[in-house]
Image (cartoon, grey):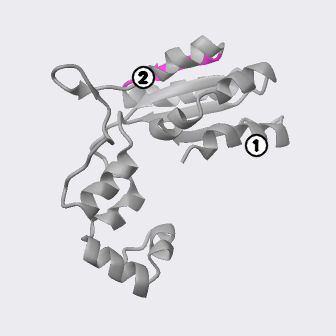
Amino acid sequence: MGFGVSGILGAKLAAPDRPCLAVIGDGGFTLTPHVLATAVEYDIPAVWLVWNNFSWAAIRDIQYGMFGGREIGTGFYAGEKREPYSPDFAAMARSYGVEGITVKHSDQHGDALGHALVLGKLCLLDVHVDDKVNQRWTRFFSYSRKEFLYCRHSRGAYFSVASGRQPYG
C-alpha cells in the first residue's frame, strides 16, 4: 500500500516517452503525498489516478470479514453527523503545482483520464468511487476467522488471494 504513488516516478524515468499512470487508492496516496513535490522538482510528468472511496476500504473489508461485520478507524468521517470525509486530493495536487482534477461521476472519467494522459505534464485525478463496493481480493476475508486460519494453513491463502480463486473453490 503506497508504493505506486512513488513507484510511478521510476517508471516514468525508465520510459520517458510513454505515458505513465499510477492507479492507487486514497489510503495509499495519503501515505506518501509528498512525492508530488519530488515530481515537480525534477519535472517528471506522471499521472496519478486516486480511487477515492473516503476510506481505507481494503482494510475495512478485511475487518468486516475477520470481526463479524465490525470495523474501526478505516472510514473517514467528520462533523457532528459523521458524514463521509476525504481530503481534496485535486486541491492538494494544485498546491504542489500539479494539475488536479476531481471526477465525481463515472461519465466524466473517460474524458478526464484521456486529458491527463495526453497532457504531457504532471496530473492527479481524484476519482470519487462508491465506498460500498468491495475490492475483489478482499472477498477472501469475508470468511470467518476460523475459516481463514484453516485456509491459510492448509490451502495456501496467499495463493488464493493472488490468483483470484475462492479459498474453497
Q: Quadrant of residue 35?
A: top right
The magenta-colored residue range is 98-104
Q: Please state the horizontal and vertical placement of residue 19, each as a whole percent of the image.
A: 72, 35
Q: Which residue is mark 2?
A: 87
- Residue at 34 percent across and 82 percent down: it is 150
Q: Nearer the viewer, residue 54 or 130?
A: 54
Q: Which secondary structure lies at badge 2?
A: loop
Picture quadrant where residue 51 is located: top left
Secondary structure under tag 1 reads helix
Viewer can see residue 10? yes
Q: Which residue is mark 1?
A: 11
Which residue is more in the foreground, 127 or 83? 83
Query: Residue type at mark 1?
Result: Ala
Q: How many marks?
A: 2
Left or right: 30 in relation to 147: right
Q: Position of residue 31 (x, y in %)?
A: 54, 37
Question: Is 144 positioned to the left or the right of 2 in the image?
Answer: left
User: Which residue in the rendered view is the most extreme toward the bottom?
Assistant: 154
Residue plotted at (58% across, 13% down):
94
Q: Residue 117, image x and y in percent?
A: 66, 29
Question: Which residue occupies 53% across, 26% down?
Answer: 125
Amino acid on which the number 2 mark rests in the picture: Pro
Could you tell me how far apart the alpha carbons at marks 2 and 1 are, in whole angstroms? 26 Å
**Location of residue 130 by image quarter:** top left
